[in-house]
Structure formats: C-alpha cells, structure tokens
Image (tube, rainbow, N blue to C red):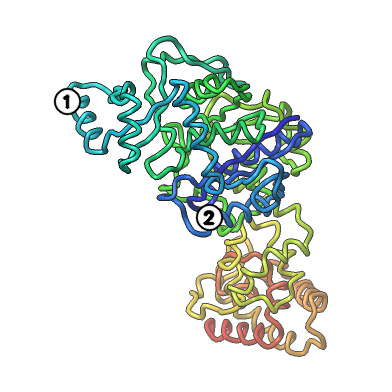
Amino acid sequence: MVRTRFAPSPTGYMHLGNLRSALYTFLYARHNGGRFILRIEDTDQARYVEGATDVIYRTLKDIGMDWDEGPDVGGEFGPYVQSARKDMYLPYAEQLVREGKAYYCFCTKEELDERREAAAARGETFKYDKHCLNMPKEEVERRIAAGEPYVIRQNVPTEGEAGFDDVIYGHITVDCAELDDMILIKADGMPTYNFANVIDDHTMGITHVMRGNEYLASTPKYNLLYDAFGWEKPTYIHMTPIMRDAQHKLSKRDGDAYYEDFLAKGYLKEAIVNYVALLGWNPGDEREFFTMDELIAAFGVEGMSKSPAIFDVQKLTWMNAEYIRRLSPEAFTAHALPYYEKAGVAKMDLSILARILQQRTEVFTQLPDMVDFLAKLDEDYSVELFTNKKSKTNPEVSKAVLEMVIPALKALPEWTEEAVHTLLLSMAAEQGMKNGTLLWPVRIAMAGRQVTPGGAIEIAVLLGREEALRRLELGLKKLS
C-alpha cells in the first residue's frame, strides 16, 4: 500500500510551498488508494513557535486534507510527534556506532569554528575531517562518563559514489568525497532533522517521500543511512520550487507567502488550493478548475514539472474572481458579510448587494471600498461629477432633473425597487429624455462618486427613502 507523509516543522504559518507539498502528498495517497500520514517534526526546538502545530491542523482541515494517521488521530506507528519519539533515535545511532558506520565526536564549537576559518583562509569549503573517528573506545567511554558533551556523526565513506533514483529528476549521484559526516544525534540528545527523518520514514512504513528539491543534496546521505541499516529505500519524488519570479523563490521574508495571508486578503480557500495545485503540475488537458475530488482523480506524478513554478498573483486573483462568480448568491453573501459589517452596510438589502457586487468582485477585501459610500456620503464631492457627455448631462440639466425627480419620489406610495424603477423610467419617457440623462444625476447625487457598483435605482432602494431623498436634496442644493 502507498503510504505518504506530510512532515512539517511547527515554525509559523503555513507557507504556500508547504501547502503544495502537503497537497501533492495527500493527492498522491488518495489517488492510489493509500494512506496519508501527518507527522510533526519538532526536533529543532530553537525554531519552535507556540501555536504553530494548531495552525497546521487548522489549515489542513480547512482545505479538506484529512489524515489517516497523526498526532491527534493516532495510528499503529505513533507517536507522530518527533519530540515524543526522542528515546527511539539514540539506539539506532548507537547501532551504527557499533558497526563502524557512525562515531562519537567531542569537538567543541570553538574548535570547529577555528577549522572552518582555516579552511576559508585556504579558499576551501569546510568539511569535518573525521578528527574523532579513530578515538580509542576506552577514551570515548571515559569522556562520556565524565559528562563531556558529544554528538554522533555519520561515517560517510571517503571513496565511491552515493546516489538515488528520483521520479522527477532521474538518477542522481554524488562523489562521497564531497559529503560531510553529518550529525545524527545532537549534544542535547535530540536527533537532527535528517536522521530523524530517515528513522521515522522507515519505522512508519513510508513508501513514497514527496518533498521540495532543496532536499536533493541531502538524499544521498539519507540513502547511505538506509544502506547502513539494510533497509528498503522509499520512492523519492522531489518537487521544484515555487518562484516569485525567474530569479527569486517565493519567500516568507517578502510577505504574501502564507496561506492565511491570502485568506485575510479575501481569497477563497478553494481558489487558493486549485491554483497551488497547478503550480508544478499539469492535468494533461485544458482544465483549470478542479474540486478536491477532481484533483484526486486527475493527479499523477507524470504531470509534475521539472521546471520551477512561477507564482502569479494576478492569475490567482483571476481564478478567485471566477470562483466568486460561481458561488450561489447566498454563499457570496455569507463570505461578504464580514466586509459589509466593516463598511457599515450589513443591514441593507443583501440580495441587491449580492446582485450588483458578485460579478464585480475579485477578492472580498475590495468590498468595503466598493460600498462605503452607501454608509457615508462624501458631501464634499464636486459638481463636476454631474457632467457626462455620454449621458448628455451637465450641472444645468442635472438641476432640472433633480427638481423634477425629488417631488415625485417623495410622493411614491411604496419604496421598492420595482416602484422606483417604474417611476424614474416613465418620467424619462414622458420628458423625451434618454434614461441615462435622468439616471446619471440621480445616481451622482446619492453616491457622490462617478463609479459605483450599482445604478441609481439599486442605490436608492439600498439607502432607503429618507436617506436617498436627503442626498438628492443635498445634490440639488449644490447645483443651485
């Protein structure tokens, strides 16, 4: 059975690169009828962020990526948090020491810094020189018994090649002479990320490892560990990076790299997931819009790209707008309501707001600026707004229109969209006016701006009789 894992470190919010890794790992497992495992890799306590694990849970659940095994749901291969597995790593490292495939190292930070500086002075890249490899067993035991700090290092061969096969990149080999003796167990007794990764993947029965291609350089050392233990290696699938442009990766430091950033900017989660799925994967046809179930059915590694994916926020925004247009009016209103409340229009006719706003909205954060004039008129607007060549209006024509319209609206028996519509358009017909000639000054007087998401009739109904007439009379006063 296919067993994949998403193994994030709880160091902050969910970066879009991590989100894509989780998504592809989930899709691959589901497409192949396998199991998707969540493992929290918290061995780097210095970078641990309080609450970050909850962010991981919340994000995956919000998107619909339910895991089959994990810290909160259990499973037969737990614990699923690395810090809770701490006691299992040292025996594996000690086994390698006994077999000559790892060794205790007592070199201090100061000693290593001195050798690193010396290598730099020679123009060389520093690599640990196996200084402690051949230390007599008695000395090792004495120094450990004395409480002297130590790490356990992997004993990488000095000759030959180390390699692995990757589904995306093919066969990759490196000269063992270029590899460092990486630390397996740190001085605090915790395993390094690389060592814990191998032990956990093996003991959890992970069959397919999907991760970013920044781990390509480490994978030969991983495979040396698999060989040292005599374990079967997983299938490796390394993903290309997500780039901000041709030269720069999408970076946390540059902002806009987190899933929750985009939710806060008014993007729909469905649009974000759909767009992220297409960053480095192609379904093999012209489709661009997928539900999660459709992604599961279509996903395959043969569609994954070898080229970096460029994150285009304009394309995401376009896709988000398409998703918004496909919402039911009720669903649109549910998403829009917090933004209506911010703008002070949440008590207006929500069905009219949905009708005039849904087709114009790209991201929900646009809504307050689109409708704030309904809550508060900028009474200092210029009378020049009443001039419009297309509608054949100017201040003089607009004044005449308002003088005619205001009394008629005051006398209107009921203030409904149908009643206002019938009244205004029949008045234009009676006067031999184009509809636009009458409606332009009415809309400008009520909105105080040239561009509005709705027309004069919708605005009048949204404002209500009292406020609409107040604004019309203010407009007439400006024109008088």
Q: Choose top left, top right, bottom left or bottom right for residue 184.
A: top left
The quarter in which the N terminus is drawn is: top right
Q: Who's the residue at 62% across and 60% down the image?
A: 364
Q: Is residue 317 left or right of residue 45?
A: right
* Residue 111 locus on image (x, y percent): 22, 34
Mark toward the start of the polypeptide (1 vs 2): 2
Q: Is residue 454 left or right of residue 106?
A: right
Mark number displayed over residue 52: 2
* Residue 51 locus on image (x, y percent): 53, 59
What crowding class fits label 2: few (fewer than 14 Cα within 10 Å), some (14-19), or many (20 or more)? some
On screen, residue 442 above or below 239: below
Q: Is residue 121 left or right of residue 333?
A: left
Is residue 235 in view from this perspective?
yes
Q: Which residue is mark 1?
A: 121
Q: Who's the residue at 59% across and 66% down the image?
A: 370
* Residue 48 locus on image (x, y percent): 46, 52
Mark number displayed over residue 95: none
Q: Label 2's element?
A: helix
